[in-house]
Image (cartoon, grey):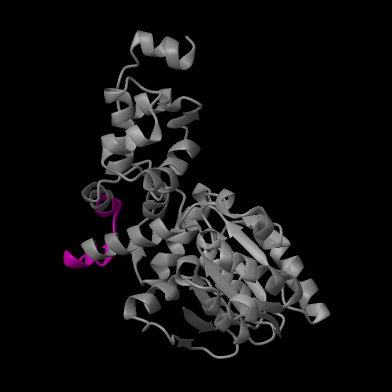
Amino acid sequence: MAIIRTARKEQTVTPVKTVRENDSFEQSLRPRALTEYVGQGNVKEHLLVYMEAARKRGEPLGHTLLHGPPGLGKTTLALIIGHEMDAQVRVTSGPAIEKPGDLASLLTNLQAGDVLFIDEIHRLRPAIEEVLYSAMEDFALDLMLGKGPSARSMRLELKPFTLVGATTKTGSISAPLRDRFPHVFKLAFYSQSEMRHIVERTAKILQVMLEDGVAHHIAGCCRATPRIANRLVRSIRDFAQVRNEETISLTRACDTLHALGIDDVGLDRTDRAILHAIIEKFGGGPVGLSTLAAATAEEEETLEDVYEPYLLQQGYLQRTPKGRIATRLAFDLLGLMVPEGVQKNLFGM
């Protein structure tokens, strides 16, 4: 659990873990205000309205649930909410809250208007969720003291706070918990122009000079994900610095991406291994998730949460009741001919 103070105090306090240099470096790349946050226009528009309304009423922002694929900026948006509301942000995660007492300790230490950010909120245990219900609705904590006939209930009043939850699996959150969030936002993949803007911003922060066309090329290889964009810019910078290149050329960017196994559309070795397995080992599909995981030596959750969303969004993969199938775009990408029998079975030709 980490505590991050925003506008009130420009420091980070970590009672449980020490903030390492890499943590501070990563935070330096994060935008701190909605005006600096690139993309997600619909989410920003609604957040501005809700935050302004809450400020006029003198209340904390209503509880907010952020969901979407990894790396799209859910944590950054939670920290921005705290900054915009002039609030202290306490950061924890679902797996870190092991028992109701852990949650009670967090909630009772919140000050009025504080933001409690729970990452991977879908991994909260049912017993902890039940404690959270009254805290979210009534700003009260109902606890049972003791066991057996001598057990008694106790209610602790809490100061009004904002709970911000982040998840990559909305369906894994129980309906009672999900319904207690008045604001639910889905973060979508970013457009090419938005990714170029993010690449240029990251390069400026890292004091990296990019030649014309480099930012556009990198943006097309980032899987429409800001976290990956930041990682690629840092990697390309490192390759250039080792070779004493003050300005990053398009050749340097392409060579670095090639060394990392990333192609021009942002697919890495694992993405291509997935498509190759479906096409070459299973005739284009359909193939079940567990079978595909065994064939690629990856975990089912990793395939489903990390790799499939982008392959589906780009049209290289389809999910059917019988399993995953490769599309014609996947065959074309890998330079493979679609066998006549497969054409009929998969594409209805």
Give the x, y percent position of residue 239: 22, 61
In the image, is residue 253 above or below residue 285? below
In the image, is residue 16 above or below residue 272? below
Give the x, y percent position of residue 46: 72, 61
Task: Count numbered badges in the picture.
Answer: 0
Q: Choose between 54 and 100: the one closer to the eye.
A: 100
Q: Choose between 334 and 118: the one closer to the eye.
A: 118
Magenta segment: 240-253
- In the rendered image, residue 212 lying in the magenta stretch gets the answer no
The residue at the far right in this view is 57
> Which of the 4 image quadrants contains residue 105?
bottom right
Give the x, y percent position of residue 164: 61, 68
- Work out whether residue 263 can be spotted: no
The residue at the far front in this view is 149
In the image, is residue 191 above or below residue 118? above
**Direction from residue 138 to residue 27 in the image, left or right:** left
